[in-house]
Amino acid sequence: MKTPAAKSRSSAADRLIARTAAAIDAAQVYDVATVSALEFAPKLSARLGNRVLLKREDQQSVYSFKLRGAYNKMLKLSPQARARGVICASAGNHAQGVALAARQLGCPAWIVMPRTTPQIKVDAVRLLGGRAVLHGDAYDDAAAHAIELAAQKGLTMVPPYDDADVIAGQGTVGKEILEQIGEGPLDAVFVCTGGGGLLAGVAAYIKQHRPGVKIISVEPEDSDCMAQALEAGRRVKLDRVGLFADGVAVRQAGALPFKIARETVDVAMRVSIDEICAAIRDVFQENRSMPEPAGALGVAGVKRWIAEHGGSGKTYVAIVSGANLNFDRLRHIAERAELGDGHETLLAVTIAEKPGAFRSFLKALGRHPITEFNYRYATPAEAHVFAGVKFADQAERDATIAELRRAGLEVRDLSGNEMAKVHVRYMVGGRAPGASNERLFRFEFPERPGACLAFLSAIGGRWNISLFHYRNHGAAYGRVLCGLQVPRQELSECRATLDALGYSYWDETSNPAYALFLGAQT
């Protein structure tokens, strides 16, 4: 996070801010845009001890603020330029904004998109009347092709952010915030930032009319071109950008947005992927809407700001900038949301490979909710556990880890290990050549404290557990995969014990997936 020193603007900077604010007052966007709601968020506010308001740009017809800037830019073109047509390069929200604005104005629009663009986005552009042109494998390829087509066909480029008319259109979001707040208190506005068009417009308008309000730019840690530019005092070009928050995955801030931002932005903040996921979940719990990762940056910023600065009774606005979320990302978001708030901790623990050791480990862990459990026989002497555990706070987490270590267990906290979170948690397991007489069972455990311990108590020290995998899926029953070392002559007794336990279970020893990936090779 970077907090610039108090700004003393030059007269030229004052004129730029005043000119931008005046252009926002004159911007025409409401033929396509609506005045989006500024909603009180009661659950977030109660939890954070401050008044949090959400500016719902995800409610626009294309589920993003981008139509504002595109329409304002295209409306100001000459009739001749509009008749020839416009073009842009985009695989996201800007593409839909340009296509919608073109349909409203009766203007031909070419939208150049990488061939890797999800079909749902290509279809959305075509449904709005845009001419989707698929070219190249990445955005840079599409952008270069758009420039070539513009020259060949005499088309006008509609930039996504680095343009005065686009900035003026996006800045109407800031104008609406002040109109909706009225004379009420407003301490800070948190703005998601990519190339900087929305940031520049909102910041210029609010600083012109209410200069005491803080403007806080929020970017992902792995796509922070504006934060780096403000810290360096010049625009910088990132070698690479993270793609999780694809709506703000920009390598270099726009020239004009940067020029405005360095005069108006009070703080440039970075948040992690886990914090973004937690913010998406928070918005869903608040109003059952689902912002895209870039759209949740403002909420993530509010939470980080309050965690670091404390205080209460302040009024903060977070702009929810868009909701064009790919459905297949929901699983990843759900997995990472608990880590983003620090509620889930990922632990790697080495325990003795002997009957009863697993049960002793769970007793040492206590009654903390377990979200995930991966256990696999490693050697005749030891086994490895990968566990997700919920703690109320950092103190409880530290005390529990200390207790485990006092019990003689080797414990590592992997909550900050990106490889572990993205890959290893799904790869724990594998073959265990030394696990003889292994039988594989699939269970449904009731989701209640002590269910796993009851299972281990029933098994007792009779049969060694060689594999155990559990993941909480938010349902009434948890799904468990368990390997037991059961000699053939004891198999009927084992099944009778499992029947008496009362949990639904299936013998998966003959499952081909087990033979291929987990069972001992013969």
Image (tube, grey):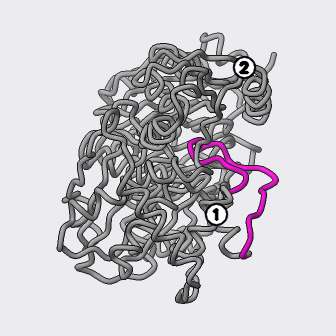
**Horizontal arrangement in the rendering, residue 464 relative to residue 457 (left or right):** right
Corner quadrant of residue 54 = bottom left
Q: Position of residue 508 (x, y in %)?
A: 54, 16
Near-viewer residue (361 or 87): 87
Q: Main secondary structure of the magenta part?
A: loop
Q: Position of residue 428 (x, y in %)?
A: 67, 39
Residue at disc 1, secondary structure: helix
In this orientation, does residue 437 appear?
A: no
Quarter of the picture holding the C terminus: top right
- Mark 2: which amino acid? Lys
Q: Is residue 161 above or below residue 221?
A: above
Q: Per the image, is 247 magenta?
A: yes
Corner quadrant of residue 44 = bottom left
- Mark 1: which amino acid? Met
Stretch in magenta: 233-253
Of the numbered discs 1 and 2, the one sitting upstream in the chain is 2
The residue carrying mark 1 is: 226
Near-viewer residue (134 or 323): 134
**Horizontal arrangement in the rendering, residue 152 relative to residue 68 (left or right):** right
Q: Is residue 514 above or below residue 255?
A: above
In this orientation, does residue 515 appear?
A: yes
Q: Which mark is residue 153?
A: 2
Residue, x 65% and y 34% (percent of image)? 157
Instruction: Count numbered badges in the picture.
Output: 2
Q: Position of residue 24 (x, y in %)?
A: 40, 56
Residue at disc 2, secondary structure: helix
Q: Are marks 1 and 2 in contact (CB under 8 Å)?
A: no
Q: Position of residue 308 (x, y in %)?
A: 46, 79
Near-viewer residue (501 or 410): 410
Badge 1, how many Cα within 10 Å: few under 14, some, many 20+?
A: many
Q: Is residue 462 above or below residue 304?
A: above
Residue, x 59% and y 50% (percent of image)? 163
